[in-house]
Amino acid sequence: MTNSPLLRVKDLVATFASGSDFKPVVNGLSFHVYPGEIVAIVGESGSGKSVTSLSIMGLLNRNATISGSILYEGQELLTMSATERRRLRGKEMSMIFQEPMSSLNPMLRIQTQIAEVLKIHNRSWSKSAIAKKVIDLLEQVDIPNPEETAKRFPHQLSGGMRQRVMIAIAIACQPKLLIADEPTTALDVTTQAQILALMKRLNKQNGTGIVFITHDLSVVADIADRVLVMRTGKIVEEATVFDLFDKPQHPYTLGLLKAMPTLDTSF
Ligand SMILES: Nc1ncnc2c1ncn2[C@@H]1O[C@H](COP(=O)(O)OP(=O)(O)OP(=O)(O)O)[C@@H](O)[C@H]1O
């Protein structure tokens, strides 16, 4: 790991002009992610995890006001032009959402959707180079029969396969930063474990820094190097994954840990 963070968020405040009584929903958040690191943000529903990730990606609604600082490789994202941010999105940083069906276009074949992002960021590539890269990406995310799958439409794939396609799109341009917002929540446990293993492998192979948003501490234990515990728009605890489970400091973290199902839990 190098000494300069890939991402440095400082005093981030996000407020919506409607729906939240003008109270900040993210309120003075500071954290950093080093290249190659997996940082999990964990917290209950409504604590501001998604607003944080959308702020980093520059995808928040127009009714949001953001202040503070978000530095990506030392460049301030909050003062960047929309064109510059679009250039970074997809190429330098990309995002995976919980429900791939709402991010994929139901009318377009998988190959067209992956090719689209490749074309935007690699204008000089030939058609055959793009087609080859599409298959290569589907192979990287362990899609069986990639040539066949590339021709399918999203509804012809299982939820796990759709999420793999979303990951293929997200890594198409080898971003340095990947933000994954509850990418496994909608999946059964076996598929969830496979997707987590895939993300860990991509992190190790490509050195991608990952911000992994979840409300599930067992996922945190599986994937993260470092953990930020978020509550009502603030970070209440930050620790390595080992320390968080070994000696949690904040009562809220203790509560989350106690609520984790164990083998002894009776339902
Ligand atoms: N576009 C919006 N307009 C108004 N309020 C919003 C908007 N988007 C989010 N909020 C509010 O901001 C707060 C934080 O929402 P956010 O989606 O970041 O929570 P979360 O921690 O990601 O929750 P979940 O785990 O349920 O996804 C919530 O109170 C939510 O209602």
Image (tube, helix red, strand yellow):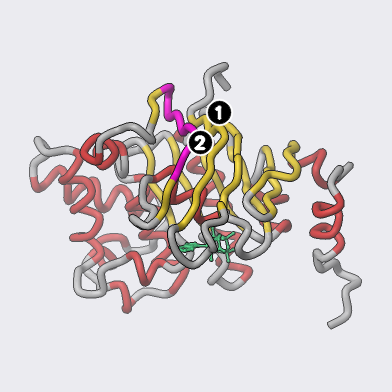
Ligand 1 within 8 Å, label 1 CB: no
Q: Secondary structure at mark 2?
A: strand
When asked about the image quadrant of residue 45, the answer is bottom right
Q: For the N terminus, which image quadrant?
A: top right
Residue type at mark 1?
A: Tyr
Q: Residue at x 67, y 56 (%)?
A: 43
Q: Relative to 84, is 45 on the left or the right?
A: right
Q: Is residue 16 above or below residue 32?
A: below
Q: Which residues are magenta?
A: 66-74
- Residue at 30% x, 32% y: name it: 80
Q: Quadrant of the C terminus?
A: bottom right
Q: Position of residue 40 (x, y in %)?
A: 62, 46
Which residue is the site of mark 1?
34
The percent coordinates of residue 185 (x first, y second) are: 57, 67
Q: Is residue 88 at all visible to an observer of this figure?
A: yes
Q: Which circle's residue, 2 or 1, is located before the other in the chain?
A: 1
Q: Main secondary structure of the magenta part?
A: strand
